Amino acid sequence: MHIACVHTAKGNIDIFERAAEGLGLPPKTLSHHLRQDLLAATEEQGWLTPQLREEVARELRQHLEEADAVLLTCSSIGPAVEDFPDAPVLRVDEALAEAALAADRKLTVLCAAQTTMEPTEALFSKVANAHGGQFQMVLVPGAWEKLKADDSDGYLHMISEAADQAYRDGADAVALAQASMTGAAERVKHGPAPYTSPKAGLAAAVKKASS
């Protein structure tokens, strides 16, 4: 089995290798393809423009030639996956949304990047309309700047603090919308470990690749 992962953040490569190990996948099941320029351009434009969406689609299409499934790990450019309705192309956060909204409870969805807010809200709304569930979106101000400055510890601290605050404010569950947030889950003290996307998204890709 070969799953091609398309990343826009270098740090996500290790995150997904750990997720693969946690799922018991054989070594070298994943290949990693880094396109930091796609996220940089999306941030510069403020949204995933049609031109950028087509560029993302070209990248995904390229890996379909040699992979059993393609997993897009960046939430900001996730909507490009909708251009592949009949192909084994997945966005990592769709499985996250389905898992987090499975129970009817008060869910807080945390984002760090402003460009992630709109596509993530649209995705969770689609899943909520289909399966039920309630959620609210929360942007963690200043967190993304920490990560871009290579302060990953400060970044994860801000995310875990925001999750703890969500629990203090009455949330029953928290979902970390971006794969880069994963390490913050184990730091949360005031509620259950938040839902994270890498293992859920990768498991969905394995299922798709095997079908």
Image (cartoon, rainbow, N blue to C red):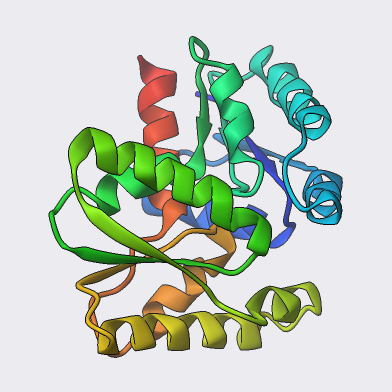
Q: Position of residue 67 (x, y in %)?
A: 61, 20
Q: How many numbered markers are drawn?
A: 0
**Where is 161 relative to 3, above or below?**
below
- In the image, taking residue 158 as reference, residue 65 lies left or right, namely right
**Where is 123 relative to 148, above or below?**
above
- In the image, taking residue 34 as reference, residue 195 lies left or right, namely left
- Tell me where residue 188 sits by quadrant: bottom left
Q: Position of residue 163 (x, y in %)?
A: 39, 80
Quarter of the figure that contains the C terminus: top left
Residue positioned 35% across, 87% down in the render: 164
Residue positioned 63% across, 48% down in the render: 74
Residue positioned 40% across, 74% down in the render: 185
Front-lying residue, 164 or 51: 51
- In the image, taking residue 152 as reference, residue 177 lies left or right, namely left
Residue positioned 31% across, 90% down in the render: 189
**Where is 167 relative to 206, above or below?**
below
- Tell me where residue 114 sits by quadrant: bottom right
**Where is 172 relative to 119, above or below?**
below
